[in-house]
Image (spheres, grey):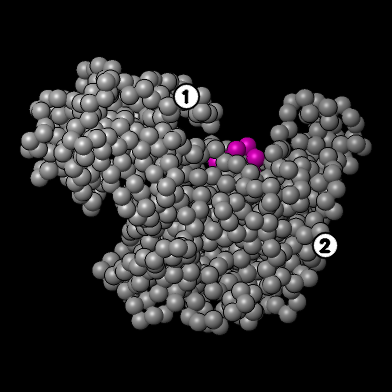
Amino acid sequence: MVKQVQLYFIFLFTLSTFSESTFAQYESRGVAFNYVDAESFFNAGNYYDALPLYEILMAENPKVVEYQLKIGRCHLHLTNSPEKAIEYIENIYTSKPKTPDVEYYLGKAYALNYQFTKAIETFEKAAKNSKTSVKLKDEIPLLIQQCENAIELVKDSVAVEIINLGNIINTIDNEYSPTINADESTLIYTYKGTKSIGGRQDEFNREEVNGNFYEDIYISNKLLNAWLTPQSISDSINSKLHDASISLSPDGQKLYVYNDTRDFSGDIFESKKENGRWTEPQSLSINSEFWEGHAAISPIGNFLIFSSDRPGGIGGRDLYSAVKQTDDSWGEIKNLGSTINTKYNDDAPFIHSDGVTFNFSSEGHTSMGGYDIFESKIINDTGYLQPRNIGYPINTTANDIFFFVSGRGNAYYSSARKGGFGQQDIYVINVNDVITSKPVLLVKGVVKENKNFTNAKITVRTESGKDLGTYYSDISDGKYQFYVDLNDFYVITYEISEFPSQIESIDATKYTQYTEIEKNINFVSKDVNINGIALTRENPISPIMNLKVNLSNKDKTINKVYMTDEFGKYDFSNLPNDEYYLLFLNEEDEKIIVDSTYIFKGKVTMKGIPYSKALINDMPTDEDGNYRLEMKKHYYGVLSGTSSKLDEMSPEDVMAKFGDQTAAGVIFKVQIAAYSNANNYNGKHLTTLGTIEKTILEDGITRFTLGNFSTLRAAKELQLKAIAKGQEDAFVIVFIYGKRTYLDELVNTGVFK
């Protein structure tokens, strides 16, 4: 990467593991070799690896001022040890005050360590000193202004709690530039370190042992409020070049990335999530022959703000806007103007969920050092409010950049502050009391076609017909999400092929603060058939004629009755593809002999094809769609007039009341499969969750289960883990003294209270 691109990442210095054996190896090589490597690392901005080499050189030649100054300058960039910069540079200034540029670097050391008055005095001396280079003198007015800004900002600090995301996400290497989807369930960020695909390379993408690690993009998903182990996002995105995360659309379906292109200019690309996979990134039409490094897209996807160093700007890097055209390209590119852009660098934009508030980072305005994060408002496509610094301690004397805020007000950003796991770590801060964006409504849910996740087209309009964007549910998990303002009525249309559209309406005017609402949509085919035969015994077969067999679904929106024929047969047709059906008997039926057991055997088909894993009385059909039930008193009249205690409770209420209860002989397990031929099941994807047990119940079907818990909550947690690993039909089952039963029976009989 050429210098102009490399400067973009200069504060994201490489962290490598400098072991004792490596240190000893360098120590024994001699001054010449170590000096060449130290200079190579230093000039590449790799201060972490340069530092120990200069320390070796200084130990051998303690009077060489250059080594001491380079050590001090390394500490200026390694913000986990800024106080050491003062120690080394002050020592040079005391003993060798005529050292070129020493006052300039001492001023920077004071400023970095919040000694602003000293910093200003030292910068003023450096400005008058003939030993200070002209280039550095040109920077001094800005540095003095930043110190003066810092004095005021520290006086008026903001109250926030800065939380490290922990060692699942953060490592001894670098993690930075985080971006999240709307409900904060997916985190995508840039990783730079020992696992980088490109390894160490020089600025021309050639392998180089003294080079910088190149960047990759990593992804983590949240399960039960905890981040899962991050993975490289995709081979279609990560390469041996620089690949850095920029921004994720609120629905999580479009990812904007920075790529260090082979012409070394650096451009912005877009990858889409299709069929659960990320596509190869495509270059955006905003790119030029110059550098484009960061971008933010509006919530509805029709407006973009990006950074570029193209000619004709106001400063080094400027922010520009672009508007989505009818052919999906980006056009009408405009500089944001002098209200936003300064004669210094302005970068890293982010547009909030309200579509009006936006943040960016700037070295100008009222920065207290390096890049600071600012807030402004979009008045129209050419007008913006005067930016304001969002305050200390969010902003520091080092670089503060890559700020991404959820609708909830949680801001994710990276910092090299003390107390982290490595150099750059990712942190989260709630900024509801700092940022002035308007509250919004997050609409989210899952779309299914029958019981399978589907890729639905979701169109959002106001009640008056204004189009607010089109979204798509993710075919891998059915999820969708989008933001709307709180000041309107909305009509949402869900569409998939071969089904009538489903329409939902939302009155967002009744909300006054950030709210999340869930709308789960199921497109159901009415082509399921459940047939069977009712028996009093199987050997010899003894069918029951004129028995009223009742059928309902979990939501009780279906209630059908079928009287068996002379062969004991019943047949329910034209049923919606519900995930759960219940066959039961009416205890008032004159054919019923109380306390008797009846056997129901049959098949479930959909469009004439065997329907496996359909739930009949909580029992999944086998791979041939077959089921066998023993109809005991538990299923007499369960739905005839009265309901069980659980029927009126939400899943959350059930968990709150019964999740931690225990009872003698009661065991909870997670059923992951049921097969008449056990050899047909392969559960390798679940082996990390524990031992898979096989149990053959009295119906002859083999059940595969995980776990052996005394509480429902523990079993439910394992169920969610199994679902996360792809076993979407996993569910909790109950045994009492080794015999399978049901949770509502435990409640109704008083075992659970």
Residue at 40 percent of width and 37 percent of height: 625
Percent of width and height locating residue 146 = 60, 64
Q: Which amino acid does the dot numbered 1 rest on? A: Ala
Near mark 1 (Cα within 10 A), the count class, few <14, some 14-19 or many ≥20, is some
- Residue with the most extreme right position: 32
Q: Which amino acid does the dot numbered 2 rest on? A: Asp
The question of residue 506 being in magenta is answered with no
Point out the frontmost of discs 2 and 1.
1
Residue at 35 percent of width and 55 percent of height: 526
Tell which circle, 2 or 1, labels the residue nearer the N-terminal end: 2
Answer left or right for 599 relative to 639.
right
Observer-nearest residue: 198 or 454?
454
Answer left or right for 332 relative to 354.
right
Observer-nearest residue: 575 or 134?
575
- Residue with the most extreme front position: 566
The answer to which quarter of the image holds residue 397 is bottom right
Magenta-tinted stretch: 169-174
Residue identifier under label 2:
263
- Looking at the rendered structure, the secondary structure element under dot 2 is loop
Percent of width and height locating residue 23 = 78, 29
Percent of width and height locating residue 32 = 92, 37
Observer-nearest residue: 668 or 131?
668
- Looking at the rendered structure, the secondary structure element under dot 1 is helix
Residue identifier under label 1:
678
The answer to whether residue 616 shows anywhere in this view is yes
The question of residue 170 being in magenta is answered with yes
